[in-house]
Image: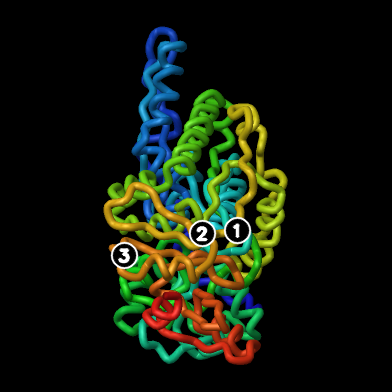
């Protein structure tokens, strides 16, 4: 990979080194005769990166962290105040943490590594203490194109403009996917370093040919009919996740507060897993995202699995991410083993781990329903869809297992079987290997199922 100067570096350095004059976080205290009587804890989160909701949007709406700190305050006589700061990506959270202004933050795997590197560089080290949501195959990131685009495969991106957020997990997916396709991500495509919303606008305006982004942007654009999936990140078969990072100084000096946060995160995770529809509606109300999109990722069979445990396979994947960021010039090196600290979670939560994710199943959400129905096969789902007042129907990709909207999926009729795929390229590869298999429109698939 080319080592030319990355255009994001000056922006990152300026953001990180600009002095911040006022103290709004850093567990600031108002002193009394016997010490601080008020402590402010600042939490940075990404409301629309919805597989961080158990450490951000959902957690905030449920008030569990406030409850934990209120109970603590009754014991130690301190009033705790939480300041929630919402950002579009992980980079500004890292900037504020490096300046000592955010205590706890959540972000994706690639930004977490930048967080570790910048913290060490600026002598404000951080530690990864829990996971929010993950997908063991990488399905949280997707490359999409505009509806009607002639682009069908990654190979078609050669010479094209692709919008992504450099240094994000979605950028990492793009780089790896292009490399596997024999395309140099620096020389053969023109990467546009843009915020997700800017990239979505660029795709709509035609100033970008494709968009590589993280949850929930691909699903949102597909749901709204503004994008078509070109590449499913799960084809990489490499885990991707989001997690919680904390300033090392804060973790040492305010260990009890961190424990309270991790207990609150576990409670929010329990809530999401027990009441996925209610959780999706709550997150949708707080973010303005369609609840159907939130559920695609965070539902009972969603693309993201929520589990705070720092699983070995996720830590191993983090180590595999380091060379990608080094080659892009975004980090020099990261000691992942020193960055990952499972001790606080094990101290705060008696049983931090859930069972691993099971295979996703087709799912139907009817209008007015507070629960969903699952089915044993795509055909059964399509039978139930016909004539029903459908709010959303979801189906897993036949090869990767990535859940997708049934009416946005590419369907293949294979004898008596009906199979769905996130991308047309995936459907064509499958159909090309099966005699008699053919791609059919969604409406035809529904009729065939009946």
Are the residues flagged by discs 1 and 3 in contact, CB closer than 8 Å?
A: no
Q: Position of residue 221 (x, y in %)?
A: 36, 70
Q: Quadrant of the C terminus?
A: bottom left
Q: Nearer the viewer, residue 409 or 263?
A: 409
Q: Is residue 140 visible?
A: yes
- Under circle 2, the secondary element is loop
Residue on which disc 2 sits:
303
Residue on which disc 1 sits:
359
Cα–Cα gap, marks 2 and 1: 10 Å
Q: Earlier in the sequence, mark 1 or mark 3?
A: 1
Q: Nearer the viewer, residue 144 or 430?
A: 430
Q: Position of residue 204 (x, y in %)?
A: 31, 79
Q: Earlier in the sequence, mark 3 or mark 2?
A: 2
Q: Earlier in the sequence, mark 2 or mark 1?
A: 2
- 239 over 7 or under it: above or below: above
Residue on which disc 3 sits:
388
How packed is label 1: few (under 14 Cα within 10 Å), some, or many (20 or more)?
Answer: few
- 105 over 231 or under it: above or below: above
Look at 57% across and 31% down and name the residue there.
Answer: 251
Q: Position of residue 424 (x, y in %)?
A: 50, 83
Q: Is residue 398 left or right of residue 343?
A: left
């Amino acid at each position: 990979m080319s080592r030319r100067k990355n255009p994001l570096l000056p922006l990152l350095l300026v953001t990180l080194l600009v002095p911040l004059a006022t103290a709004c976080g850093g567990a600031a205290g108002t002193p009394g005769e016997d010490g601080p009587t008020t402590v402010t804890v600042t939490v940075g989160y990404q409301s629309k990166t919805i597989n961080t909701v158990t450490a951000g949007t959902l957690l905030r709406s449920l008030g569990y962290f406030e409850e934990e700190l209120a109970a603590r305050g009754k014991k130690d006589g301190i009033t705790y105040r939480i300041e929630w700061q919402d950002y579009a990506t992980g980079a500004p959270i890292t900037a504020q943490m490096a300046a000592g202004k955010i205590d706890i933050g959540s972000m994706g795997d690639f930004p977490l590594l930048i967080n570790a590197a910048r913290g060490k560089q600026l002598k404000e080290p951080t530690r990864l203490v829990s996971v929010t949501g993950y997908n063991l195959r990488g399905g949280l990131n997707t490359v999409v194109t505009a509806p009607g685009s002639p682009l069908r495969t990654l190979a078609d991106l050669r010479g094209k403009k692709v919008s992504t957020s450099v240094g994000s997990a979605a950028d990492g997916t793009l780089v790896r996917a292009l490399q596997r396709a024999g395309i140099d991500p620096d020389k053969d495509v023109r990467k546009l370093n843009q915020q997700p919303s800017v990239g979505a606008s660029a795709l709509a305006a035609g100033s970008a040919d494709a968009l590589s982004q993280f949850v929930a942007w691909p699903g949102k654009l597909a749901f709204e009919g503004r994008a078509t999936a070109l590449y499913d990140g799960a084809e990489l078969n490499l885990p991707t996740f989001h997690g919680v990072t904390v300033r090392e100084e804060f973790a040492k000096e305010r260990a009890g507060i961190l424990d309270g946060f991790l207990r609150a995160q576990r409670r929010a995770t329990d809530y999401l897993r027990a009441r996925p529809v209610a959780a999706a509606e709550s997150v949708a109300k707080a973010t303005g995202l369609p609840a159907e999109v939130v559920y695609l990722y965070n539902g009972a069979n969603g693309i993201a699995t929520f589990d705070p445990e720092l699983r070995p396979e996720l830590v191993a994947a983090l180590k595999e991410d380091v060379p990608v960021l080094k080659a892009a010039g975004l980090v020099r090196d990261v000691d992942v083993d020193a960055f990952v600290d499972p001790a606080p979670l094990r101290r705060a939560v008696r049983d931090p781990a859930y069972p691993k994710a099971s295979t996703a199943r087709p799912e139907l959400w009817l209008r007015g329903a507070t629960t969903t129905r699952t089915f044993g096969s795509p055909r059964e789902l399509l039978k139930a869809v016909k004539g029903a007042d459908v709010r959303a129907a979801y189906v897993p990709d036949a090869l990767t297992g990535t859940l997708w909207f049934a009416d946005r999926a590419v369907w293949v009729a294979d004898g008596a079987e009906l199979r769905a795929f996130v991308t047309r390229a995936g459907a064509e590869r499958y159909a090309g290997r099966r005699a008699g298999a053919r791609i059919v429109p969604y409406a035809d698939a529904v009729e065939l199922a009946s």
